[in-house]
Amino acid sequence: MISQLGRYEVLGELGQGAMGVVYKAKDPLIDRVVAIKTINLGLALDEKEEYEGRFYQEAKAAGRLNHPNIVTIYDVGKSADVAYIAMEFLEGRELRDIMNDGGKLPVDQVLDIVAQVALGLAYAHEHEIVHRDVKPSNIMVVRDGHVKITDFGIARMASSAVRTQTGMVLGSPKYMSPEQVMGKNIDQRSDIFSLGVMLYEMLTGQAPFNGENVNAIMYQTLNAAPPPPNVLNPGVPEMLNYIVAKALAKPVDDRYQNAKDFAADLRACRDTLPRSGQPLDVSKAPAGGEKKLPDAIAVTGSRNVDVEEDVGASSAAKLSQAFDSGAATMRLAAMTATPDEVDQLSKTLKLARPSMEEINRSAQTVKVPKAAPSRPIEPVSPVRPATPLSQPALPHRVGSLLLFSLVALVLLGLAAIFVF
């Protein structure tokens, strides 16, 4: 282990990330303990210059962020082939470790955590900084239950640099937005989708898009629709179903357009729930890091052949109509906004304003989707029964016999006249 990085005295190793080692260190100038994240610059000369330039540009941009829910960056520097960022040292635990330890958290605590993350993202987005790698292992929960987002700007710097060199995109496959998977330009709405994935996982205990390999996960992110959260966790209120649906909308225009609105809806939903009163325990030693898939994913254009060919490993049930993004937005507005705002939204989306009765009825119809039968069941054509020999048919038959008898008698009478 190294003992010095610039002026910082390294005290120990805190962990290892995708881009380098994280150290606990001391700044002797002001006697302050800091966390130092290192970035390996062991690249070819031309690549190194571009990579280093982007690193400083993004690190400085992230350093301008000053928000209670974003980790504070103090300094950037370089020592030999190692660039580093000195940042606030946090006494707490990664959200990933907390999730691994305790399973599903109470819904009100989930909403508290995710709302804080959304507020931090909203502040960063207002300063034109997109995180690009929102996931539980980049969220720290400190002793007072306060939440801090880490690694701001680093993911953007890394993905831009590496993509220039190799056509690769960095990110955590399970939390990537559809536009990230496609290799398209992204904005703040990509962070909102990633946070929606994290919210879904915290509520249900499983990721909305999963698979046996990276290609399967990417295919699901682009094509699959997960079941509503309250199908997997009955404690999730219906209002939260709509919030998740809006955050996970695949078309970017159907999503929350800013993280501040996302946070406002999360807090409005939380206010309708009883408080669990169970403080998060962040004093335990980490139970183990996140199980990671490869961070670099090949993106060869707007479509990925490998992804399309791996359909077999990633079949998923479709959402019910109660969980589609447009309808979810209208139902959510009907539950939280003023009548004038709902009317305006109804005109904008060209959707009818739902009544509370319709909202409650849709909540009762959300069920776990069932797999289609392997062989379609052909409908059986009904067989019309033969006309029964019932009483209503007898008068007609009797009448016919009488008429036949009368005609026969008349003919016999005529024959007798001619004979005699």
Image (cartoon, rainbow, N blue to C red):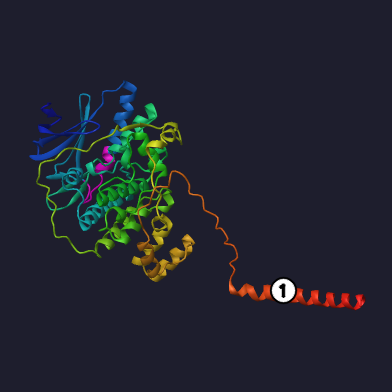
Image spot of residue 29 (x, y percent): 9, 37
Residue 375 in magenta stretch: no
Residue drawn at 23 percent across, 36 percent down? 291
Amino acid at circle 1: Leu
Q: Is residue 99 left or right of residue 376?
A: left
Which one is nearer the viewer's eye here, 312 or 343? 312
Q: Quadrant of residue 265?
A: bottom left
Image spot of residue 229 (x, y percent): 31, 53
Range covered by the magenta-colored residues: 59-70
* Neighbourhood count class around disc 1 (C-alpha, 10 Å): few under 14, some 14–19, many 20 upward: few
Q: Is residue 213 left or right of residue 69?
A: right
Question: Split into 4 quadrants, where in the image is the C terminus?
Answer: bottom right
Which one is nearer the viewer's eye here, 307 or 58? 307
Q: Secondary structure at mark 1?
A: helix
Asked whether residue 30 appears in the rendered view, the answer is no
Image spot of residue 303 (x, y percent): 46, 35
Residue drawn at 33 percent across, 28 percent down? 50
Question: Split into 4 quadrants, where in the image is the N terminus?
Answer: top left
